[in-house]
Image (tube, rainbow, N blue to C red):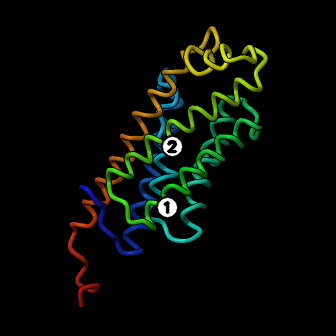
Amino acid sequence: MNSYPRLSRNSAITLALGFIAFAVAFRMVRATAVPDLPNFSPLMAIALCGALVLPGALAFGAPLLALIGTDIVLNLHYGAPLLGVDELIRYACFCVGIVSGIALRRSQAGTVATLGAAAANSLLFYLVTNTACWLTSPDYAHSFAGWTQALTVGQPGFPPTWTFLRNSFVSDLLFTGLFLAAVHLAARQPAPAAARA
């Protein structure tokens, strides 16, 4: 699985939208049924993998709509604001993931590069969101020590922030790997008789 195969337009759209639907369902169930697993979510994988195979405007639109839609539902469920600075920063990070997926598709990168991009985007998301929290939260000292706290142990009464990195890193690699495996399986399926004729 050094490079991923090309799929027909219809196969790519079906596979990507099916993956996004699965990932959205997983996120909703995980967030409500297993809240003790913070940041174990397929969000960056949705952004990266959707853009990897979806054509044109769908590459941006489908992953972002899935992310925003699930955020709205979960924010309503938890009584959180529907849109704030935190969400905008997160969406910017996901846009970087989408751009990464498009770049990987254009360069015809393989599986290793795609998994590397998933890991890099996971780390970038962690650094950007935790740095933004450090900058905006009065609970952190605005010093190097405060920034280090934001990146490691976080605030008292909450899980250490390094666990967010671990969980997002593992889930991003897991879901990206599952998607790439599905691409390889779909490419092995024989074309329908009508397409071969």
Identify the image quadrant of residue 182: bottom left
Residue located at (51% from left, 21% from top): 162
Residue that lies at the very extreme toward the front in this rendered image: 144
* Whole-number angstrom distance, CA of label 1 to CA of label 2: 13 Å
Q: Position of residue 122 (x, y in %)?
A: 50, 38
**What amino acid is at disc 2?**
Asn
Tell me the residue at 55%/17% (across/down).
Answer: 152
> Quick one: quadrant of the C terminus?
bottom left
Which residue is depicted at the point 44% across and 60% down? Answer: 104
Quadrant location of residue 193?
bottom left
Residue closer to the observer: 35 or 61:
61
Looking at this view, name the residue that lies furthest to the top.
156
Percent from the top left, x then y, of residue 29? 48, 35
Residue 103: mark in rendering: 1
Horizontal relation, residue 111 to residue 95: left or right: left
Residue at position x 56%, y 13% in the image: 153
Amino acid at pointer 1: Ala
Toward the viewer: 149 or 194? 149
Count residues near mark 1 (Cα–Cα under 10 Å), then give few for <14, some for 14-19, many for 20+: some
58 vs 43: above or below: below
Q: Which residue is mark 2?
A: 121
**Mark 2 Cα within 10 Å, few/some/many (few <14, many 20+)?**
many
